[in-house]
């Protein structure tokens, strides 16, 4: 049976309304691409996807192909990525790539909010920022899109290079580099090198980067780049300062005070990045302010919630030593009563895990926090019998049912896999 090449699959794509990799979601006349995972084989669902509404399906196992509407390729994931790159080249849309250890999704959302004030914009939905999510985002591009903002994530060396080779960004923005996914990268230097693969692509292809001038880790890998700088100093292209966050961040820029709906002073750099991108692309200053003040986070990142019983700061989508320290230090300086910490394990730290969890326990003790709940094996071991510790979120939930909390200001922070978001409804 004939195997289709990228150009042949692209013709099928152009005849289709969209691309799907989920046989449970088959928009009429879409193109289904069969992917494989640890516990599923999309090939087995290809014919069902066509029956459910897809115009065509692409498979990489011959037994499922029919050369009529289910076609064979060498490797479906590789084809998805090649297809996206061909589409990107064909349309030639200006692409802004965003990555970083912390803040990349929030920054992407803020940049998108600002740019949408002036442009027909495509941007990454949710956190579809991996080897599947990035090509799916690029394949959503239409001729009418004037700009695209593509978020890129990484957990291993070479991940960002793979993604920039697909999306081919004209502009790059690295929010920061910190201690995260050490298990995958091997070292902090590995994190820096991998995030820097975005800079490497821009450097090799003559684009520009938007760079935080106050971050020495970014300066160290920015040689030879055309950089649009932002930071606290008036010598930068865009500069501003934080006016505090109790709990919502307020930023001064261009003689204006911007009142955001973001919790945490650590979001200052993310806001300033969005201002910089918007300013560079000639979004009117008043529109920049309006966009930033209207944006309300809804993704368990820097979220504030008044439950009627307590005030919650919910930052439970991701946790690593850098973001944990930022959240804790911000919470420490907030002038609010009855503070409580609910923290979950920081994952994928490899050999640094014990040391980093111990540091958090030392910080909690040094700063006199008494009302503390810790979830996960790592924190349980580090606490050594101090504080309230729980094996998992279900144990914590049961404890909170038996020991209701009211009138507290609570920071909820942990890796997504600890599922701390489950306790929000009882607080």
Image (cartoon, rainbow, N blue to C red):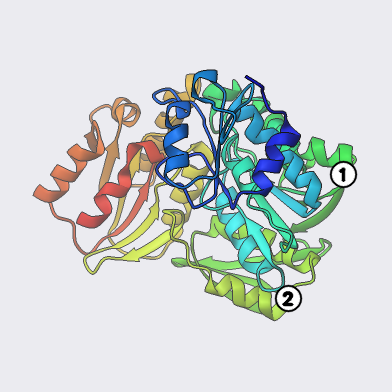
Q: Which residue is drawn at the image coordinates 22% and 34% (left, top)?
A: 390
- Disc 2 element: loop
| Above or below, 28 relative to 31 | below
Mark 2: few, some, or many residues within 10 Å (few <14, many ≥20)?
few
Q: In this view, does 105 lie to the left or right of 190?
A: left
Closer to the camera, 37 or 405? 37
Q: Is residue 302 above or below residue 341?
A: below
Q: Tell me the quarter of the picture where residue 310 sits.
A: bottom left
Contact flag, marks 2 and 1 (Cβ < 8 Å): no
Whether 212 is drawn above or below 182: the answer is below
Give coordinates of residue 339: x percent, y percent. 31, 56
- N-term-proximal mark, 2 vs 1: 1
In terms of depth relative to the viewer, which is nearer, 345 or 120? 120
Image quadrant for the N terminus? top right
How packed mark 1 is, by other alpha carbons closer than 10 Å (few <14, some 14-19, many 20 or more), is: some
**Badge number at residue 254:** 2
* Dot 1: element: loop
Say left or right for 399 vs 29: left
Quadrant including the C terminus: bottom left
Taking the image as drawn, is residue 32 in sight?
yes
Q: Nearer the viewer, mark 2 or mark 1?
A: 1
Q: What is the x, y in percent for residue 270?
A: 62, 57
Q: Mark 1 points at which residue?
A: 225
Q: How far apart are marks 2 and 1 (CA)?
A: 26 Å
**Snapshot quadrant of residue 120:** bottom right
Residue at 81%, 51% in the rendered image: 92
Q: Is residue 185 left or right of residue 223?
A: left
In this view, which residue lies farthest toward the left?
A: 402
Q: Position of residue 210 (x, y in %)?
A: 77, 53
| Percent of width and height locating residue 20 | 52, 43
């Amino acid at each position: 049976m004939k195997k289709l090449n990228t150009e042949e699959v692209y013709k099928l794509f152009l005849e289709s309304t969209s691309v799907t990799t989920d046989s449970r979601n088959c928009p009429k006349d879409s193109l289904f691409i069969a992917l494989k995972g640890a516990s599923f084989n999309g090939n087995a669902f290809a014919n069902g996807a066509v029956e459910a509404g897809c115009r065509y399906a692409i498979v990489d196992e011959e037994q499922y192909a029919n050369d009529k509407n289910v076609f064979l390729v060498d490797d479906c994931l590789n084809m998805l990525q090649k297809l996206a790159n061909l589409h990107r080249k064909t349309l030639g849309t200006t692409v802004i790539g965003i990555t970083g250890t912390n803040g990349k999704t929030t920054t992407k959302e803020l940049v998108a909010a600002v740019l949408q004030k002036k442009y027909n914009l495509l941007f990454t939905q949710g956190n579809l920022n991996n080897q599947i999510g990035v090509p799916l985002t690029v394949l959503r591009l239409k001729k009418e899109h004037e700009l695209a903002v593509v978020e890129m994530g990484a957990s291993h060396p070479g991940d960002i290079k793979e993604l920039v080779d697909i999306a081919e960004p004209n502009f790059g923005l690295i929010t920061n580099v910190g201690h995260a996914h050490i298990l995958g990268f091997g070292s902090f230097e590995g994190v820096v090198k991998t995030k820097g693969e975005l800079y490497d692509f821009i450097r090799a292809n003559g684009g520009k980067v938007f760079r935080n001038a106050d971050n020495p880790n970014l300066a160290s890998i920015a040689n030879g780049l055309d950089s649009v700088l932002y930071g606290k100093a008036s010598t930068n292209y865009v500069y501003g300062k934080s006016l505090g966050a109790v709990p919502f961040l307020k930023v001064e820029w261009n003689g204006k005070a911007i009142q955001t709906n973001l919790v945490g002073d650590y979001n200052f750099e993310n806001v300033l990045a969005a201002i910089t991108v918007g300013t560079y692309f000639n979004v009117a200053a008043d529109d920049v302010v309006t966009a930033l003040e209207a944006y309300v986070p809804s993704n368990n990142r820097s979220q504030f919630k008044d439950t009627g019983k307590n005030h919650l700061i919910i930052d439970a989508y991701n946790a690593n030593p850098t973001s944990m320290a930022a959240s804790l230090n911000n919470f420490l300086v907030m002038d609010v009563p009855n503070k409580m910490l609910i923290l979950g394990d920081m994952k994928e730290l490899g050999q640094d895990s014990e040391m980093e969890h111990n540091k958090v326990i030392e910080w909690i003790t040094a700063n006199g926090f008494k009302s503390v709940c810790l979830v996960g094996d790592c924190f349980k071991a580090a606490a050594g019998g101090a504080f309230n510790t729980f094996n998992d979120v279900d144990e914590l939930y049961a404890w909170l049912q038996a020991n209701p909390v009211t009138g507290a200001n609570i920071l909820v922070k942990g890796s997504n896999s600890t599922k701390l978001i489950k306790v929000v409804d009882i607080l």
